[in-house]
Image (spheres, rainbow, N blue to C red):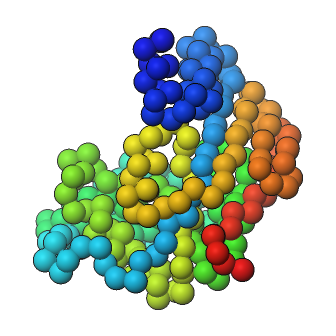
Amino acid sequence: MINKLRTNIAEIGGFNAVLWCIGRGFQRLGVPIRFVRYYFVAQPVPDAPVLGPRRGRTIAVRQMAPGDPAFAQLPLTQDVLDFRFGQNGVCFGAFDAEGRVLGCLWFCFGAYREDEVRCVYRLEPAAAVSWDFDVYVRPEARGGFAFLRLWDDANAYLRSRGVAWSLSRISAFNPGSLAAHARLGARRIGAALFLVVGPLQVSFLKRAPWLHVCDAGAAGPEIAVRAPGLQ
């Protein structure tokens, strides 16, 4: 445990490492207490594709609508799909030459209801931003062009909607995801901490409402997430 703590401190910082270790301790003891900490990041929508025209050209990217049979190839239940499409979610899938799904990427616009804790993100300014989530690439396709090809086509769609920034949240305990977003030019714009004790949730925020307490029957706080440099 000490060695793991030292590694975590080096990767995610002392405060996050302590929260992670305490949470793991509660989990091992079967105590229903957990910490969830997010960083909010803003990723600029580039003016042009990242990949050259010959890179990843065997990969096809298309929008996936509700009921698309290709969803059966992804680790997503029908309840999850209903939750996402119920928020008018937009999904893009990357496919190889044989039609196998290599990965997917989701967007919402205007607002997004969180699925791990109870809160709603209000995206500002609504006309110029999106919310991206569940960027997934199959393990065997990682290290290839699927990830960037997926983003290139998704960014073309965002540009067509006038979107300048894509916002998202990343677990503060996930250094790999933080690094992947940083390589795409993402910058950190905020953070939030949630303490979940059984059905009770306490939210510690860096802007109003600052502190929010709710039980299982409540929707949780509404959190404004604003893109940098936009009014």
51 with respect to 34 (left or right): left
Can I make out residue 109 in this image?
A: no
Q: Is residue 64 above or below residue 11?
A: below
Going 41% across and 77% down the picture, which residue do you hit? 46
Can I make out residue 130 in this image?
A: yes
Q: Is residue 49 above or below residue 79?
A: below
Quarter of the C terminus within the rendering: bottom right
Query: Would you identify the image quadrant in which residue 203 lies?
Result: top right
| Along the line of sight, the residue nearer the viewer: 98 or 179 | 179
- Image spot of residue 78 (x, y percent): 49, 54
Q: Is residue 95 above or below residue 22?
A: below
88 with respect to 55 (left or right): right
- Image spot of residue 168 (x, y percent): 56, 59
Going 21% across and 52% down the picture, which residue do you hit? 143
196 with respect to 141 (left or right): right
Going 50% across and 27% down the picture, which residue do you hit? 9
- Image spot of residue 91 (x, y percent): 44, 68
Going 36% across and 69% down the picture, which residue do you hit? 151
Q: Is residue 80 above or below residue 12?
A: below
- Image spot of residue 14 (x, y percent): 58, 28
Query: Would you identify the image quadrant in which residue 150 lies?
Result: bottom left
Total labels: the figure holds 0
